[in-house]
Image (cartoon, rainbow, N blue to C red):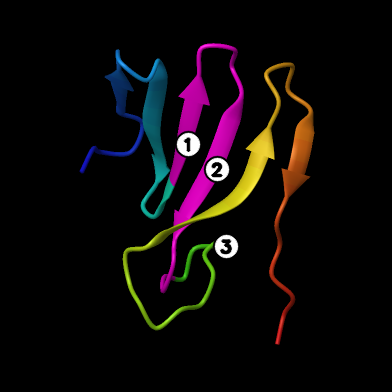
């Protein structure tokens, strides 16, 4: 697993995986569109509670021009 701030580019898929925090990642395509992921079962702000650990869940998307297409949030219990 990469360190925070490091990235891994897939030439075949034309996409970059970036580790943004301890338990969150972004997939960035060649148009600059970003899919935001967080690992479940962590205390991360965007992580979803789950009994299974280390499963990445989609928590948001950002269009290439910087406007958030949507962002998922969790209601406080």
Q: Is tag 3's residue or tag 1's residue first in the polypeptide sequence?
A: 1
Task: Provide residue 58's location: percent of width, then percent of height.
Answer: 55, 52
State which quarter of the image contains the C terminus: bottom right
Within-10-Å neighbours for mark 1: few <14, some 14–19, many 20+: many
The stretch drawn in magenta includes residue 55:
no
The label number, if any, that marks residue 26 in the structure image: 1
Task: Provide residue 64's location: percent of width, then percent of height.
Answer: 67, 18
Q: Are marks 3 and 2 in contact (CB under 8 Å)?
A: no
Q: Quadrant of residue 34?
A: top right
Q: Secondary structure at mark 3?
A: loop
Q: Is tag 2's residue or tag 1's residue first in the polypeptide sequence?
A: 1
Q: Are marks 2 and 1 in contact (CB under 8 Å)?
A: yes
State which quarter of the image contains the N terminus: top left
- Nearest-to-viewer mark from 3 and 2: 2
Q: Label 3, label 1: how many angstroms apart (C-alpha)?
A: 15 Å
Q: Is residue 57 above or below residue 20?
A: below
Q: On the image, numbered disc 3 is attached to which residue?
A: 45
Q: Secondary structure at mark 1?
A: strand
Q: On the image, numbered disc 2 is attached to which residue?
A: 36
């Amino acid at each position: 697993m990469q360190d925070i701030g490091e990235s891994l580019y897939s030439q075949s898929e034309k996409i970059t995986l970036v580790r943004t925090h301890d338990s969150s990642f972004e997939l960035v395509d060649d148009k600059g569109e970003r899919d935001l992921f967080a690992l479940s079962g962590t205390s991360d702000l965007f992580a979803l509670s789950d009994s299974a650990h280390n499963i990445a869940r989609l928590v948001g998307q950002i269009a290439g021009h910087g406007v958030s297409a949507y962002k998922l949030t969790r209601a406080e219990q």
